[in-house]
Image: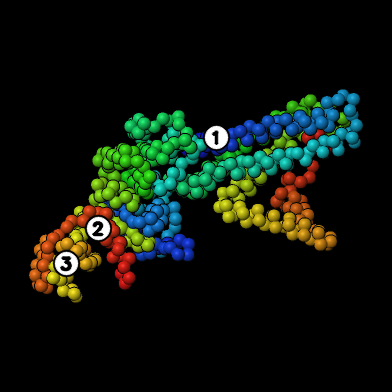
Amino acid sequence: MFRQILYTQWKWSGLGIVAAALASFVLPILTVQGAGTSDPTWIDARALLPALEYWSRAYPALALAIGLLGGTMAWTNDHRGRHVYALTLPLPRWHYVLLRYGAGLALLLVPVLLLWAGAMLAGRMATIPPGLHAYPHALALRFGLAVLLAYSIFFAVSSGTTRTAGYVIGVVAGLMVLQVLILLSGSETRLVAPIFDRLVTLPGPFEIFGGRWMLIDV
Amino acid sequence: MSNAIETKNLHRRMGKTFEIRELSLSVPTGSIYGFLGPNGSGKTTTIRLMLGLLRHTGGSCMVLGRPIPGDAPRVLARTGYVPERPHLYTTFTIGEAMRYHAAFYATWDGRRAEELARRFGLDQTQRLSRLSKGETGKLMMLLALAQSPDLLVLDEPTDGLDPVVRREVLSALLDYVSQRDATVFISSHLVHELERICDWVGVMDYGRLVAEMPMQTFKNGIKRLRVTEAPSLVSDTPFVLLARETGDGLSGGEVWVVRGWQDPMKQYFEGVGARLREVVDLDLEEGFVELLRTFRAPGA
């Protein structure tokens, strides 16, 4: 049963997963290349860290994108058939949801593992200045948790009806529009930024996406 | 006789204007039950309630001896369902659809599936998105039958199919039923099709069950009578008078459409001073139309 569900999910999102896996593998390598750590003459940690930090923004973005891909693709075909096929299968609804969730998670392990492999390879390729260290395991673990969180959220949102997804998108879009209107009126009131800060700083639920995603750090 | 499906006072409101009301129907085990009704009468909603796809807000529903929706997964494991609109994943090939479906049913009969695929001329490498309406209909019937179900619930399974494909699909269904003592619940508005295969019939209209009886009773009981010299007011008829109309110009008299007719009832006309000229059998479609006409008449 799980194998068949996994197969369907692979069929629907395989291309995206392969692309995400490649991006995940390449990103740490690009990080060290882009920061110039492969250059043996580069030893100034003070100059290296900002360059690495610049690249670190790409990790949470990639984790979000992978979560979005996995979460939405898990349900696309069921939505098309108005879930009739899924509902007529002889298993409780929670069981079917768990199978779909598990299958998506299993597929998303591929980019996470490849990021881990890429990070280890990049760590070895890099010339690390004294006082700095490579953290490929921590980075991969953080990336994995971020993917898990993003996937779970998008999976839950897209499992609902189009109306539910519409409400979620509507609230977010409404806040954005309100913020723009407030700024246009000349007021300094910040509406979105404090909410965003609350969400991405401890104890916010999306704290994992904020902060520094450093492959090489002190 | 036990019932494969039994609903009592089932109720469900759909939107603002339509509701299934006080629906009590009984489908005897082993029967082929034709579920008739015009488009929009509530046939599909009733089926969805019976399979637990929708939750009823009143009454009760038992299918294969188990309560719905509480025990829906167990019931669905023994039920082959062909929905009104194709529900399968169109990205699949036929072979993939068969393997996917098989994974969920312990009773899946792979040999029967292969046999039906050959019989229906289905190429297992063909993608579902490229199938014709007829091929999709055949595939859905194949999947339902290969599950080896005790109950088949078919929602307009031959709607839109050409007569050749329709015959192929129904013949496979009848072969299956003859091999296993399965119950078939088949909804359709193609009355002639049901007339050939069903032994029970239920008629829906406006979310209510208008009639439910053995097919033979339904067919034999509804007659068109040509009557002359009938009194303007009739009462205490031994049959149900569904309609009374002026006859055509040639023969004169009146045409009565009655339900529950039996030959000894001819004597009634002598008693009221009328003359019964002719008794005409109505086929299922005519009976169905007359039944709905009476049901929809003001004050019905």
Q: Residue at x 76, y 46 (%)?
A: A210
Question: Residue pushed farthest bottom?
Answer: B233
- Would residue B217 be found to the left or right of residue A176 on screen? left
Q: Which residue is mark 1?
A: A11
- Would residue A33 be found to the left or right of residue B267 on screen? right
Please, what is the three-letter code of the amino acid marked with disc 2? Gly
Question: Residue pushed farthest top?
Answer: A40
Neighbour class for label 3 at 10 Å: few (<14), some, many (≥20)?
many
Neighbour class for label 1 at 10 Å: few (<14), some, many (≥20)?
few
- Residue B253's disc number: 3
Q: Nearer the viewer, mark 1 or mark 2?
A: 2
Q: Nearer the viewer, mark 2 or mark 3?
A: 3
Colour theme: rainbow
Can residue B102 be seen from the camera position used here? no
In the rendered image, residues at marks 2 and 3 fall on the same chain:
yes
Q: Quadrant of the C terminus of chain B?
A: bottom left
- On the image, the x and y values in percent for residue B220 come to 18, 56
Task: Give SS at disc 1.
Answer: helix
The answer to the question of whether label 1 and label 2 lie on touching residues, with beta carbons closer than 8 A, is no
